[in-house]
Amino acid sequence: MRWVDKACPQCGGDLYPDYASVALVCLRCGHHEPPPRLPRVTARLVAKQPSSASQTPKARVVGLIEVSDQSGPLIEGVCASHGCGVVCCLASTLVAAEPEVPEADLFVIEADRGGLAVALARRLRLLAPAVPIAVVLTSWSESEPEARLTAEFVIHAPLRKREVKAVLQVMESFGGWLP
């Protein structure tokens, strides 16, 4: 899901997500607005559903691909605090002749080189086009423009807890968690 197609109410320019402050921003005029919220299901609507009361909402899963030893525990901790599960995957499973893509609601890709992370994001975009992708790059990476075209999120290493939290908040706020 991409959010670039929103229009600014002041100048008509494109609104882009600002993941650090969880807002939409117009780069032309500087207009800020909160992200749109999806309507919540009310208790009355839930009560009208069939008697499958034992069904609980599916826990969200974040797929980690080639995440470093420093970033992994941080991401896993933030995901646990948001009630998300984590599944780890190696790059070799994505580039195999018959790739195995894990079931996930969000993929986080970090590799030792920025170009490799972007190449993995491109490959993953072909294999799972509807799943949002976050790419972790070092600051001042020359791969960042291409990463921004491929992925919904670009996070800079070394990771900080608030950046990972912001990605999960944006996923919840913008409705990026698909049903």
Image (tube, grey):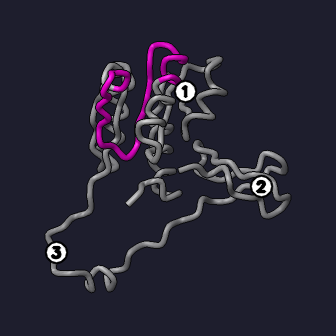
- Picture coordinates of residue 124, whole percent (x, y): 44, 33
Q: Is residue 107 above or below residue 174?
A: above
Are the residues flagged by discs 2 and 1 in contact, CB closer than 8 Å? no
- Picture coordinates of residue 161, whole percent (x, y): 44, 35
Residue labelled with disc 1: 156
- What is the span of residues highlighted in magenta in the rendered image? 94-119
Name the amino acid, label 2.
His
Q: Is residue 152 above or below residue 66?
A: below
Are the residues flagged by discs 3 and 1 in contact, CB closer than 8 Å? no
Of labels 2 and 1, earlier in sequence is 2
Res. 31 mark: 2
Q: Nearer the viewer, residue 60 or 178?
A: 178
Of labels 3 and 2, earlier in sequence is 2
Name the amino acid, label 1.
His
Res. 52 mark: 3
Does 93 lie within the magenta span? no
Q: Secondary structure at mark 1?
A: strand
For the point 49% across and 17% down, the residue is 116
For the point 82% across and 58% down, the residue is 12
